[in-house]
Amino acid sequence: MSVELIWALITGAALFGVGIYGALSQTNLVMIMMGVELILAGALINLVAFWRYLHPDVAAGQMFVLIVMTVMALEMAVGFGVAIARFRSKGSVEMEEAAELKE
Amino acid sequence: MITAQAIFIGFFGVAAVWFGIVVFRTFSMVRSAIALLFSQTALGAMFLTMQAEFLGVLQIMMMATEMSIMAFFMVMFMMDPGGMGKMEMTHQKRLSWIVGLVSFTGAVAIAVFIDWGPVATTVAETAQQTEALGLELLGRSMLVFEMAGVTILTAMIAATSVAIPPIPSPEKIHKDKV
C-alpha cells in the first residue's frame, strides 16, 4: 500500500471533518460557506490522489476534479447572491436571525 | 517506504488541515479568509507534488481569486470583521464536534483498512496529461463539460438577479412623491 495515497486520503478526511464542523457550528452564512468549501476541498484531494495513484492513465479522473471546482465556484456565486439579498432585506446574514425561513 | 514525495505530501497536508482549523479558530474574518486561502494553496501544492501540475496551478489561481473576493464580502457583511470584540459566532458546538470527529474517523478507517489494489508509480508527462485531459473534455466527456458551462452561466444569472435590488413600481414612486 502506498504511503503517499494514504496520507493524501487522511488529509482529505481531516479537511472533510473540519469542514463538517464549520458548516454545522457557524452562525454566519459566509462562514458556513467556508465550511462547505473545506468539505469540497477534502473531496478534491481524494479525487486527485485516486487519479494519481490508482488510475493515472484515465483522464476522466482529472475531469471530475474540474467538475468539483465548478461546484465550488457555483456555491460561492449563489451563496453570495443570497447573502446580498438577505443583508439588503434584514441587515444581517446571521442564521440565528433567519428562523422565519422555517415558517 | 518514505519517499521525498510522501514527505512533501505530508507537509502540505498538515499545512492544509492546520489552516483549515485556523479558519474557525480566529475571531477576525479577514484572517479566516486568508487562512482558507492558505489551506487551499497548500492543497494546490499537494496537487503539484502529486504531479497533477495543471490542476495544481488551476487550484492556486482559482482559490486566490475566490478567497480575495470572500475577504471583501466578509468585511462588508460581518458586524465585527476585525474580530476586536471577540464575538461568539457559533452554535451547537458539541454536536458539530461529534459529527466532524465521526466523519473524520469513518473516512480515515476507510482510507486505511480498504485494499486499494496496485499503486501506479509513474505518471505521464505534464504536456501529455494536459493533452489527454483536453481530448477527454472535448470528446467522451463533452456533454458533462457543456453541462458544467451552462450551469455556471445559469448560476451567474441567478446570483445577479437575486443580488439586484428590486425596482419599485411606478405607483409606489408616485405615492412616495406625494
Image (cartoon, helix red, strand yellow):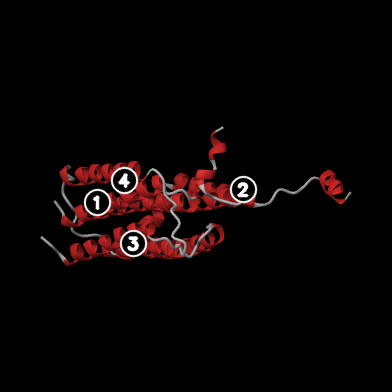
- Parent chain of label 1: A
- Give the residue at mark 4: B97
Image coordinates for residue A21, horizontal then vertical, percent: 35, 47
Kindly report which numbered mark, 1 or 4, lies closer to the viewer in this rendering: 4
Which mark is first along the chain, 3 or 4?
A: 3
State the CA–CA distance, disc 4 to disc 2. Answer: 30 Å
Q: In the rendered structure, which amino acid carries the disc numbered 2?
A: Lys
Q: In the rendered structure, which amino acid carries the disc numbered 3?
A: Phe
Q: Residue at x 17, y 46 (%)?
A: B112
Could you classify mark 2 by the number of other residues whose Cα lies within 10 Å: few (under 14), some (14-19), or many (20 or more)? few
State the CA–CA distance, disc 4 to disc 3. Answer: 17 Å
- Give the residue at mark 1: A9
Q: In the rendered structure, which amino acid carries the disc numbered 4?
A: Trp
Looking at the rendered structure, the secondary structure element under dot 2 is: helix
Kindly report which numbered mark, 4 or 3, lies closer to the viewer in this rendering: 4
Image coordinates for residue B39, horizontal then vertical, percent: 35, 61
Q: In the rendered structure, which amino acid carries the disc numbered 1?
A: Leu
Q: Which quadrant of the figure has residue B131?
A: bottom left
Q: Which mark is residue B139?
A: none
Image coordinates for residue A27, horizontal then vertical, percent: 46, 48
- Parent chain of label 3: B
- Give the residue at mark 2: A90
In the image: residue A42, left or right of residue B70: left
